[in-house]
């Protein structure tokens, strides 16, 4: 059974699928403006499309899906818009958690969750608690998230341990910093997708994306569907991920 119902999308079994995928869900406001609708309508359409993304990623076998839902900078938006986003957040998990459960999707949250309003924080805590034993795929919702804030948080954690004598300065390395990220057990994203025509990370997974492949599309997020995801995966399949070394072809020529 496909997530949130079935669709007759043909999976391309020949392409390489990322284990860990990041998606910046961008373009809701522009989608609404093109249709002369309020921005809230765009956010609702974007939330509905998250269902489609979950279904498609689950069918393709993605194990970790991290979506950028609300950034630390989004608080600067008009209060009415922020209130609508918070209401939509609660509504989404109230409506669809049972379907996530049927599909074995564990829900986790990455960000400064402790600073959220009580109602939102409780939704996050309850969502994680209910889904902890689900095994098929992890949906990680980056909410009240900022890559720089995550790094500051890691530095503070490490500094406190150095100050207490638990660590020495010489113990600090890349692995230690990674261990102090919000969700250190989640693999770094193999691929990050950004629709809407923008070509920047916008403070998303700054540490974790050091060697991520990037794929952008002019398609606005509410219209980003199975075809766009498949195109992203096909392009990803052609990438030569060298991690700073030589390509396989170059190594063979050097023999």
Image (cartoon, rainbow, N blue to C red):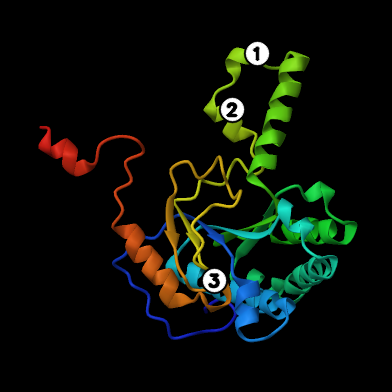
Cα distance between the residues tagged 1 and 3 = 44 Å
Find the distance from the CA under tag 3 to the CA under tag 2.
32 Å
Mark 1 to mark 2: distance in Å? Answer: 12 Å
Mark 1 or mark 3: name the one nearer the start of the chain.
Answer: 3
Numbered tag placed on residue 115 in the rendering: none
- Marking on residue 168: 1
* Percent x, y of residue 169: 63, 14
Determine which quarter of the picture holds residue 121. bottom right
Q: Left of 39 or right of it: where is 137?
A: left
Q: Which mark is residue 53?
A: 3
Task: Please tell me which residue is depicted at 13% across the width and 38% down the height of the picture.
Answer: 252
Under circle 2, the secondary element is helix
Is residue 227 among the parts visible in the rendering? Answer: yes
Residue 102 seen from this side: no
- Residues packed near mark 3 inside 10 Å, few (<14), some (14 to 19) or many (20 plus): many
SS at badge 1: loop
Q: For the image shown, how many numbered marks are present on the structure?
A: 3
Residue at the (54%, 52%) spot, across then down: 201
Q: Nearer the viewer, residue 236 or 4?
A: 236
Q: Earlier in the sequence, mark 3 or mark 2?
A: 3
Q: Is residue 160 left or right of residue 69?
A: right
Q: Which residue occupies the foreground of this view, 7 or 245?
A: 245
Give the label on residue 176, or none.
2
In the rendered image, residue 32, in percent from the top left (x then y), is placed at 65, 80
Q: Position of residue 151 (x, y in %)?
A: 65, 36
């Amino acid at each position: 059974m496909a997530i949130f119902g079935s669709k007759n999308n043909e999976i391309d079994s020949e392409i390489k699928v990322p284990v860990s995928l990041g998606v910046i869900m961008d373009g809701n406001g522009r989608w609404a403006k093109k249709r002369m609708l309020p921005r809230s309508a765009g956010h609702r359409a974007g939330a509905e499309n998250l269902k489609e993304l979950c279904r498609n990623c689950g069918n393709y076998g993605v194990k970790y899906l991290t979506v950028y839902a609300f950034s630390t900078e989004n608080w600067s938006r008009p209060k009415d818009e922020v209130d609508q986003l918070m209401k939509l957040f609660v509504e989404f998990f109230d409506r669809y958690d049972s379907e996530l459960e049927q599909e074995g999707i564990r829900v986790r949250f990455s960000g400064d969750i402790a600073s959220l309003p009580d109602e939102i924080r409780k939704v996050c805590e309850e969502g994680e608690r209910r889904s902890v034993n689900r095994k098929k795929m992890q949906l990680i919702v980056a909410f009240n998230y900022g890559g720089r804030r995550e790094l500051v948080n890691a530095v503070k954690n490490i500094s406190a341990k150095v100050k207490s004598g638990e660590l020495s300065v010489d113990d600090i390395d890349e692995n230690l910093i990674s261990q102090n990220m919000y969700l250190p057990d989640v693999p770094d994203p193999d691929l990050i997708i950004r629709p809407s025509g923008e070509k920047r990370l916008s403070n998303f997974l700054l540490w974790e994306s050091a060697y991520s492949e990037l794929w952008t599309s002019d398609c606005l997020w509410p219209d980003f569907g199975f075809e766009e995801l498949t195109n992203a995966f096909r392009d990803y399949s052609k990438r030569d991920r060298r991690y700073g070394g030589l390509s396989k072809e170059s190594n063979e020529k050097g023999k």
